[in-house]
Image: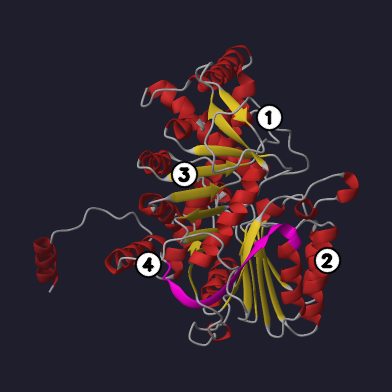
């Protein structure tokens, strides 16, 4: 199998061995993922290339299918995948499926999952809402992957639903998204990433069912890392920062729900100020109107440092990718926000191959042709303008004011976008109260909205205190009962192990212990 698309850009080939060794070690430690050689990788664009490849792999499965996805919609596309999985399960293939409770909420019925289970598919739901652990809802399984027979696998940003395929009859465009097909030893890490989440939900997969890297034949000349981020590990966050620090020429990012925390924003700004061509491609509109000013408020510090920001003009841009220096590329499920970096299970393929990076750069140019660039408007300080839509992406000029980006049609990832907006809102309000940074003029409206909202809450609390007190009391009661249940569970576990359940006092000095034992004798 061909490992990548053929390179079409002039890219550097010389590499300092000491610098390469140091970066490799730094990337391995930061991501917690070693560099694996001998893989074949194919770049897949949108559902038109991803879904057929997934279905073909499923239909030819002989031994095992591991499928982990944030959600599957019970629609035409979801039914097609369900039928393919059910057929292989009935044929004796071991089919395991993980979906996320929050992600799939309202998108597929219980009957949909029961039909899969009845066909022999082992279905597990990640992190259902539990009364005893209300804050666990913040940790989600946001991964999107498929691995078949230790032979072929996919790491991607696509869930399963008609929104990714679009509907030409209704004039609905498909969502823009990106994935990769992987063959070779890297599949070992993809399958083991799935196995860890599977074990977190229930009985683990037997070790003998998982192939080792050595048991999987080489399939190409591509080296890659499989970064399996878990809540609290921040592996992909550290890697993203390292790539921003290591980039010398280019760093081009695509993200569906960008809400960079200050350390990452500063890393991007430092790279741009040092002469790196940093670009960020984001969706052009939000399905939640109040989040539009939140998104725009985050553009100014990027633009002032020379980072170029582009907005997609299609129905929805859902891809999460990066390509740097024509050498490194990242494709997967991680968004550039705190939910992906810290709170979620995520899965990304970080590929170190110049031919693959060249293919990513070409796709990036194609996407910019269907985007509008955002620039600071010189005549109206603090405002944004959008410049010519068909301008070549490598030309830097101020151009003429262009039309507004059209609203987004169809559904979108409201929960992720809301989380990103909430983070940006918190940073803006915090800056207004603590004066830790200078606020941009574009944030004036946002600060005013929050001020009016807080004033409204204060008036309601004075005039109708029960309206505010009752929700607070319910939340406090829920948290209190959950903590007491947790304490009772811990106490019972100590009793089961024969450990004392009384309160532990201050440690007795060794000399006093010896004296007490001597007097007893």
Provide the residue designation for mark 3. 278
* SS for dot 2: helix
42 drawn magenta: yes
Question: Are there few (<14), some (14-19), or many (20+) residues within 10 Å of tag 1?
Answer: few
Nearest-to-viewer mark from 1 and 4: 1
Front in this rendered view, residue 71 or 205: 71
Which of the two discs, 4 and 3, labels the residue nearer the N terminus? Answer: 3
**Span of residues in magenta:** 33-48
Q: CA distance from mark 1 to mark 4?
A: 56 Å
Provide the residue designation for mark 4. 499
192 drawn magenta: no
Above or below 455: residue 74: below
Provide the residue designation for mark 1. 289
Which of the two discs, 1 and 2, labels the residue nearer the N terminus? Answer: 2
Quadrant the N terminus occupies: bottom right
Q: Is residue 347 visible?
A: no
Nearest-to-viewer mark from 3 and 1: 3
- Tell me the colour scheme of the image: secondary structure
Which of the two discs, 2 and 3, labels the residue nearer the N terminus? Answer: 2
Question: Are there few (<14), some (14-19), or many (20+) residues within 10 Å of tag 4?
Answer: few
Q: CA distance from mark 4 to mark 2?
A: 53 Å
Q: Are marks 4 and 3 in contact (CB under 8 Å)?
A: no
* SS for dot 4: loop
Provide the residue designation for mark 2. 80
Q: Is residue 414 visible?
A: yes
Q: CA distance from mark 3 to mark 1?
A: 28 Å
Which of the two discs, 3 and 1, labels the residue nearer the N terminus? Answer: 3
Nearest-to-viewer mark from 2 and 3: 3
């Amino acid at each position: 199998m061909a490992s990548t698309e053929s390179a079409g850009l002039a890219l550097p080939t010389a590499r300092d061995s000491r610098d390469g060794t140091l970066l490799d070690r730094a990337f391995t430690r930061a991501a917690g993922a070693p560099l694996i050689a001998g893989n074949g990788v194919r770049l897949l664009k949108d559902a038109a290339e991803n879904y057929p490849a997934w279905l073909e792999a499923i239909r030819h499965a002989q031994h095992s299918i591991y499928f982990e996805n944030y959600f599957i919609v019970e629609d035409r596309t979801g039914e097609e995948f369900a039928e393919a999985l059910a057929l292989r399960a009935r044929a004796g293939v071991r089919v395991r499926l993980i979906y996320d409770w929050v992600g799939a909420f309202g998108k597929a019925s219980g009957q949909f999952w029961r039909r899969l289970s009845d066909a022999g598919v082992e279905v597990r739901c990640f992190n259902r809402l539990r009364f005893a652990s209300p804050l666990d809802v913040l940790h989600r399984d946001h991964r999107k992957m498929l691995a078949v027979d230790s032979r072929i696998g996919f790491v991607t940003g696509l869930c399963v639903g008609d929104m990714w395929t679009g509907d030409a009859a209704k004039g609905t465009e498909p969502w823009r998204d990106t994935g990769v097909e992987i063959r070779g030893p890297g599949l070992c890490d993809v399958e083991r990433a799935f196995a860890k989440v599977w074990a977190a939900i229930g009985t683990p997969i037997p070790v003998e069912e998982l192939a080792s890297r050595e048991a999987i034949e080489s399939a190409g000349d591509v080296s890659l890392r499989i970064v399996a981020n878990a809540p609290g590990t921040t592996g992909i966050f550290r890697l993203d920062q390292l790539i921003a620090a290591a980039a010398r020429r280019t760093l081009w990012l695509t993200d569906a729900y960008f809400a960079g925390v200050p350390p990452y924003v500063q890393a991007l700004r430092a790279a741009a100020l040092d002469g790196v061509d940093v670009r960020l491609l984001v969706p052009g509109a939000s399905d939640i109107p109040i989040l539009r000013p939140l998104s725009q408020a985050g553009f100014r510090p990027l633009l002032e440092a020379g980072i170029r920001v582009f907005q997609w003009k299609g129905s929805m841009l859902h891809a999460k990718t990066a390509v740097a220096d024509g050498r490194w590329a990242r494709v997967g499920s991680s968004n550039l926000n705190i939910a992906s970096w810290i709170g979620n299970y995520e899965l990304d393929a970080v590929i170190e191959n110049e031919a693959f990076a060249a293919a990513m750069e070409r796709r990036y140019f194609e996407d910019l042709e269907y985007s509008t660039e955002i620039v600071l408007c010189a005549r109206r300080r603090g405002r944004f303008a959008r410049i010519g839509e068909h301008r070549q992406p490598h030309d830097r000029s101020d151009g003429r004011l262009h039309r507004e980006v059209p609203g987004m049609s169809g559904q979108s990832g409201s929960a992720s976008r809301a989380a990103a907006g909430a983070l940006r809102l918190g940073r803006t309000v915090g800056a207004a109260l603590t004066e830790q940074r200078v606020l941009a003029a574009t944030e004036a409206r946002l600060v005013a909205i929050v001020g009016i909202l807080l004033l409204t809450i204060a008036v309601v609390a004075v005039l109708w205190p029960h309206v505010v007190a009752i929700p607070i009391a319910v939340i406090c009661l829920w948290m209190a009962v959950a903590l007491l249940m947790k304490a009772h569970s811990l106490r019972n576990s100590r009793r089961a192990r024969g450990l004392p359940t009384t309160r532990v006092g201050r440690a007795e000095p060794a000399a006093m212990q010896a004296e007490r034992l001597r007097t007893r004798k």
